Image (spheres, rainbow, N blue to C red):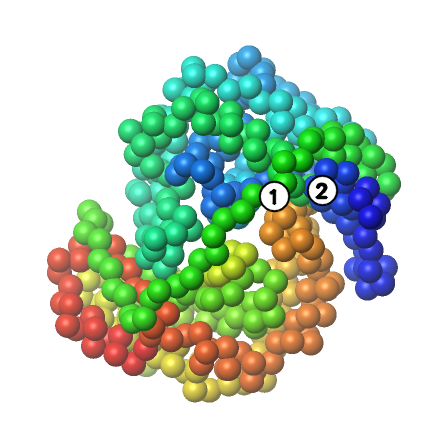
């Protein structure tokens, strides 16, 4: 029922408590009371870049909203941020554009009002746009200088070729100056009048939170949900992409396309596989052990190696990354392939499985300890999937669903040559294409 809480039996159990409301205009509110929270996090999530009608529009809009509007100067805006919040951040991804605020219980109503003014009442001007573009250009160059952001864009361009999921969030100065204030105003009005998601996490009472959020975000007229074409992969063989770049090391990404998204039952099992394979916070992830030579039987080939998994609403990716000297790239790729093959051919031992599950639970708990980060996670889950995943439900799902056999079956099903792309960035002219293909032969 609109404007009323939606709560299942499970949600009423200890440590499962959250209240989900559907506001009168179809937007969602998730309120998660936690008496142990040391602050309050508020997140407002709107449609992300995959819904934008013009390339790069979403990122420019996010910057302009988060910079200083609707205040006449950045100094005044910054003073208001410091006065009204204990933290403020804005981020844009493919699925969601999120604005996150930290506050205290006593300041919560005022912070909700402030969030509404910043997000909904923004006034865009030609002068602001012209002033913001150079900052966006610097942000893009920063990613290129550190390679990480550039490599992530190249992975998306390769895996999701031909679809808006493969478009870069950044563009050249000329491309971004092609975006007009009229484009931004029209897009802004469209996204704030689509169903959005608001999450509030902390030592809060859901009833007044619902009243305060409804008064602001629940009264916006709805123009209905946005839509975007689903992505269908046309990849049928291994892809190898090389990019010449002025670095000393070759930056490596081994990216596997996943034909399912958020909410799919296989997502949790693949998350466990990823945690064992290359979770960057673990000292004992398999990629590190195989590549840095800690077992004394191999040479130290790299300084660091990790993997991550990312899900959109309809598809996802598993990406292993590292950096190596040009003459070591073949051996690094061979060992990564060997680890993929080991996951396909051998189930995790009981001890390996227990460690992976422990780390999955601990990372979820760590997110809960940051009210702002947790609120953002909840809001984005509600926006994309329609329902948030709280920590205890996650713990129960890990214990119930994650087994060594399921991880092995997922590895066999998804770690396939015809779903994988290898991106190499750096002094690639020193590489031998035939040797690279031989190193990847067992994939």
- Image coordinates of residue 208 in percent, x first then y, are 85, 36
Q: In the visual, does 409 lie left or right of 403?
A: left
Q: CA distance from mark 1 to mark 2?
A: 9 Å
Which one is nearer the viewer's eye here, 394 or 250? 394
Residue farthest to the top, as pictured = 72
Res 294 seen here: no
- The image quadrant that residue 205 belongs to is top right
Q: Residue at x 72, y 38 (%)?
A: 25
Can you say which quadrant of the picture contains the C terminus?
Answer: bottom left
Q: Residue at x 61, y 29 (%)?
A: 119
Q: Residue at x 39, y 66 (%)?
A: 256
Q: Which residue is mark 2?
A: 26
Which one is nearer the viewer's eye here, 40 or 242? 242
- The answer to the question of whether label 1 and label 2 lie on touching residues, with beta carbons closer than 8 A, is yes
- Image coordinates of residue 171 in percent, x first then y, are 33, 37
- Image coordinates of residue 398 in percent, x first then y, are 65, 71
- Image coordinates of residue 234 in percent, x first then y, are 35, 64
Can you say whether 26 is above or below 11 in the image? above
Q: In the visual, does 393 lie left or right of 47?
A: right
Among the two numbered marks 1 and 2 on one chain, the one whose residue lies closer to the N terminus: 2
Q: Which residue is mark 1?
A: 225
Helix, strand or loop for disc 2: loop
- The image quadrant that residue 169 belongs to is top left
Helix, strand or loop for disc 1: loop
Q: Residue at x 74, y 63 (%)?
A: 392
Name the mark on residue 306.
Answer: none
Mark 1 closeness class: few <14, some 14–19, many ≥20 residues within 10 Å: some
Res 214 seen here: yes
Q: In the visual, does 155 lie left or right of 214?
A: left
Can you say whether 252 is above or below 74 in the image? below
Q: In the visual, does 390 lie left or right of 52?
A: right
């Amino acid at each position: 029922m609109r404007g009323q809480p939606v709560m299942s039996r499970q949600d009423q159990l200890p440590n499962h408590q959250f209240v989900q409301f559907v506001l009168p205009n179809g937007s969602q509110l998730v309120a998660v009371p936690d008496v142990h929270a040391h602050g309050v996090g508020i997140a407002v999530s709107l449609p992300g870049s995959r819904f934008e009608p013009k390339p790069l529009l979403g990122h420019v809009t996010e910057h302009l909203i988060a910079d200083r509007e609707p205040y006449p100067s950045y100094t005044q805006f910054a003073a208001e941020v410091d006065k009204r919040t204990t933290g403020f951040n804005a981020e844009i991804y493919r699925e969601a554009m999120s604005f996150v605020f930290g506050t205290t219980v006593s300041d919560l109503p005022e912070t909700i009002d402030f969030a509404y003014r910043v997000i909904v009442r923004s006034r865009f001007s030609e002068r602001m746009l012209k002033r913001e573009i150079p900052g966006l250009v610097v942000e893009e160059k920063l990613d290129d200088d550190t390679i990480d952001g550039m490599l992530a864009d190249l992975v998306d361009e390769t895996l999701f070729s031909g679809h808006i999921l493969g478009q870069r969030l950044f563009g050249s100065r000329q491309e971004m100056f092609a975006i007009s204030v009229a484009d931004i105003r029209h897009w802004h009005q469209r996204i704030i009048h689509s169903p959005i998601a608001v999450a509030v996490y902390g030592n809060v009472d859901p009833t007044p939170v619902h009243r305060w959020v409804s008064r602001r975000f629940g009264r916006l007229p709805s123009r209905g949900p946005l839509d975007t074409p689903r992505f269908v992969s046309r990849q049928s063989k291994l892809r190898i992409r090389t990019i010449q770049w002025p670095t000393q090391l070759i930056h490596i990404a081994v990216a596997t396309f996943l034909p399912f998204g958020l909410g799919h039952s296989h997502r949790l099992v693949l998350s466990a596989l990823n945690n064992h394979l290359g979770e960057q916070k673990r000292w004992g992830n398999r990629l590190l052990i195989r590549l840095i030579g800690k077992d004394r039987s191999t040479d130290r080939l790299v300084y660091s190696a990790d993997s991550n998994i990312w899900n959109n609403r309809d598809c996802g990716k598993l990406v292993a990354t590292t950096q190596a000297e040009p003459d070591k790239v073949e051996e690094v790729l061979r060992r990564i392939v060997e680890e993929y093959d080991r996951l396909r051919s051998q189930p995790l031992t009981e001890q390996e499985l227990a460690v992976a599950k422990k780390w999955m639970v601990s990372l979820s708990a760590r997110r809960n300890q940051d009210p702002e980060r947790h609120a953002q996670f909840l809001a984005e889950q509600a926006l994309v999937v329609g329902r948030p995943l709280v920590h205890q439900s996650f713990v129960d799902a890990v214990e119930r669903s994650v087994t060594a056999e399921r991880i092995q079956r997922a590895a066999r099903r998804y770690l396939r040559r015809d779903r994988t792309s290898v991106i190499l960035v750096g002094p690639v002219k020193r590489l031998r294409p035939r040797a690279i293909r031989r190193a990847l032969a067992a994939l």
